[in-house]
Image (cartoon, rainbow, N blue to C red):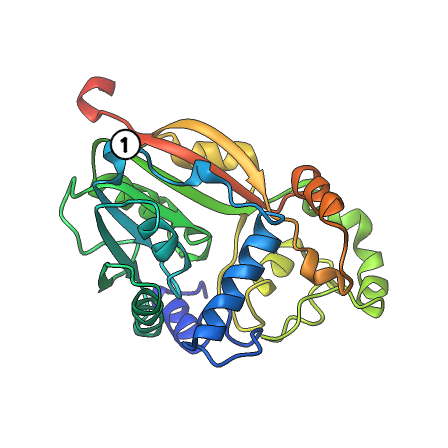
Amino acid sequence: MNPSVDDVRSFWQSNPLWSGESRHAPGSAEFFAEHRQVYIDDCFAGAMDERIFPQGRSRERVLDLGCGPGFWTVELGQRGCTELWACDLTDKAIELATRRCELYACQAQFKVGNAEALPFDDGWFSHVNCLGVIHHTPDTPATVREIARVLRQGGTASVSVYYRNVLLRGWPLFSFAGRWLRKLGVGLKGRGREAMVDNADVDEIVRLYDGADNPIGKSYTRQQFVALLETHFHVREVYFHFFPARALGVRIPRALHRLLDSLLPFMIYASLEKKDAAREA
């Protein structure tokens, strides 16, 4: 039986992002500060990629979709977004995002909502930020369609998913090394992920990344990702990041991390512009 939206909601309500891995209590200032530092260090090898953020008129009314504990909400707010909304499937995420915005003096409006059926009017937003979210939804194409629906004509979006990189595509040939990698201390701590690499099933490894009980985790090749998006969007740019260096168990030099971030990324990003349906018809 395939996981449902209710299954996804239940998991993330009990396992909000960064909980179970942090040394600090969820919702504390230390929790948010640690999350930001690790996020930038690990996901971007130490330097935020500004291509993610909207520019010009796209900053007028912005939705952070799948906001989790509010990392992107605050980052967007600090970059001049005029009217900022944050939406997530779970009450817990909205609670954490609200607290984070209070701590960082970020003005935003919050709403609980399902990304497959968003509680917003057609054409309401100038930009949608949706990073690391749609690969957790049962009906990912429906979520892409909803992102397009709530955007005005010419509106923009930043979307990312797990990237099925060369290592994942070739994992069936190298999976025998998983148990040795685990013995060497490679793997993520907390959320039941310690044995993640000791697995021959690539789809299972991707699912386990967010926790042993995570119901859905998908990865995409570049071709699959672009095909998913281009029905509703002009794909203006595709780029890559994220080598999870913290999983190595040892600290590596920044220069090496940046090289691995470019050569062996696990996240694929797209900068999008909504198509004009009338013009495309």
Residue beneath disc 1: 56
Residue 118 falls in image quadrant:
bottom left
Residue 17 appearing in the image: no
212 left or right, relative to 149: right
Residue 125 falls in image quadrant:
top left
Residue at the spot 66% in from the left edge and 43% down from the top edge: 261
Residue at the spot 52% in from the left edge and 79% down from the top edge: 24
**Secondary-structure class at tag 1:** helix
Residue at the spot 39% in from the left edge and 54% down from the top edge: 72
Q: Quadrant of the C terminus?
A: top left
Q: Report the number of numbered marks.
A: 1
x, y percentage for residue 87?
28, 59
Crowdedness of circle 1 by 10 Å Cα count: few (<14), some, many (20+)? few
153 left or right, relative to 43: left
x, y percentage for residue 236?
41, 26
Residue at the spot 76% in from the left edge and 45% down from the top edge: 256
- Amino acid, disc 1: Gly
Residue 64 appearing in the image: yes
x, y percentage for residue 138?
40, 56
> From what the image shows, is residue 24 above or below residue 259?
below
